[in-house]
Amino acid sequence: MRCDQASRLISHSQERQLNGAERCALSFHLLICRVCRKYKKQLKFMRKILSKLRDPQAYLETASSLIDERQSGEMRGRISKEIHEKLDST
Amino acid sequence: MSGKDKPIDDARRNIDRLVNQHTEALYSYALMRVGKPDVAEDMVQDALLAALQSWQSFAGDSSERTWLIGILSHKILDFFRRNSRREDVDDETWRTEYFNKSRHWKDRMLSWKADPETLAEDVDFRRVLQDCLRELSRVMAQAFVMREIEGCSSEEVCKHLEISQTNLWVRLHRARLQLRRCLELNWFS
Ligand SMILES: [Zn+2]
C-alpha cells in the first residue's frame, strides 16, 4: 500500500468500518510510514477542534472580536431596515 | 395594553433589540458554516425575520439566543439542501494534487503541537480556520460542515444532500486533505 491509498483509508475509517484486508494493509503501512501516522493524528485533531464549533456557546465571546465594530454596525443597520420593510409588506 | 396589541406590533417592538443583541453571534455562527459573508448575512436576516414572525411560539423556556440559533441552524441546513450539488465528484484529481509519482505525500507533514480545546477558543486561529473552510469548494464544504461541525452521521448527510455514500466519502476525503494543508501552511508553520 502507498500513501495515497493509505490517506484514503484513514479518512474512510472515520466514516465506516474498514474490512479485514483494508485494516490489515493500513496498519502495516502505518507501522512503516511516519507521514501517514501524522496525517492520521491530524485528522483526529481536526475532528476534535471542529466539533467544538458545534456549540452555539462557542460564538458568544469570539463573535465581537471576529467582526470589526464598523462592519457590524452597518450590518445591524441593513438587517434591521430589511426586516422592518418585510414586516410592513406582510 | 399589550393584550390589545396585534401580535405583529408586539414583535415589531423587539426588532431593534433582537438585532442589536444577537447579530454578531448569529453572524459568526453562520459564517463558519456557509463561508461567504453575504450568504451568512442573509441567513441571519432570514432567521431573525422568522423569529419575529413566530414570536408567540417562543416559550421562554430556553434562552432567546438558543432559540434564535435553532432557527438559524434550520435555515442553514435548508440552504445546503437547496444548493446541494448532487453530481458525483471526480475521484482522481486529489492524487496528483497531494501525491507525487511514487505516490508519496507532496506535503511536509508537521507535528501539530497544540491543545485542540484551547485552540478552538483562540480568535486568531478561528479566523484562519474560517478562511480555510471558505476555500473548500461548495461541493465539499456542505458535506464537510454537516459531518464535522454539525456532527451529523454519514447517513444523515447523504439523505439531506441526496448524495450517495461513496460520493460523500470522496468529498470528505478531499476536504480533509485540503483543510489539513491549509491549516498547516497558515497556522502551524
Ligand atoms: Zn504513508
Image: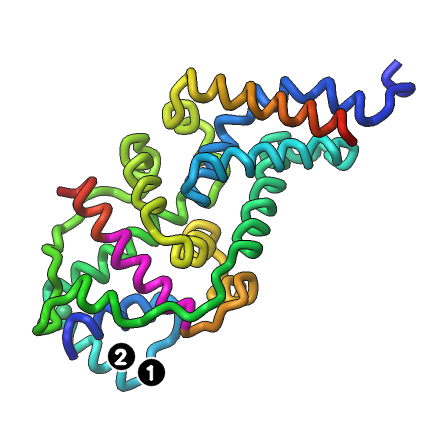
Residue A34, image x and y in percent?
A: 10, 64
The residue at 55%/51% (across/down) is B77
Q: Is residue B174 magenta?
A: yes
Magenta range = B167-180
- Asked whether the beta carbons under mark 2 and mark 1 sit within 8 Å of each other, the answer is yes
Q: Residues within 10 Å of mark 1 (few under 14, many from 20)?
A: few
Q: Is residue B45 magenta?
A: no
Chain where mark 2 sits: A
Describe residue B40's horizontal placement relative to residue B58 as left or right: left
Chain where mark 1 sits: A
Q: Which residue is mark 2?
A: A23
What scheme was used to colour the molecule? rainbow
Comparing B87 with A32, the one in front is B87
Q: CA distance from mark 2 to mark 1?
A: 6 Å
Residue B160 in which image quadrant: bottom right
Q: Residue flagged by tag 2: what amino acid is it?
A: Arg
Residue B118 in which image quadrant: top left
Comparing B53 with B92, the one in front is B92
Up the image or down, B50 lies above or below B97; here it is above
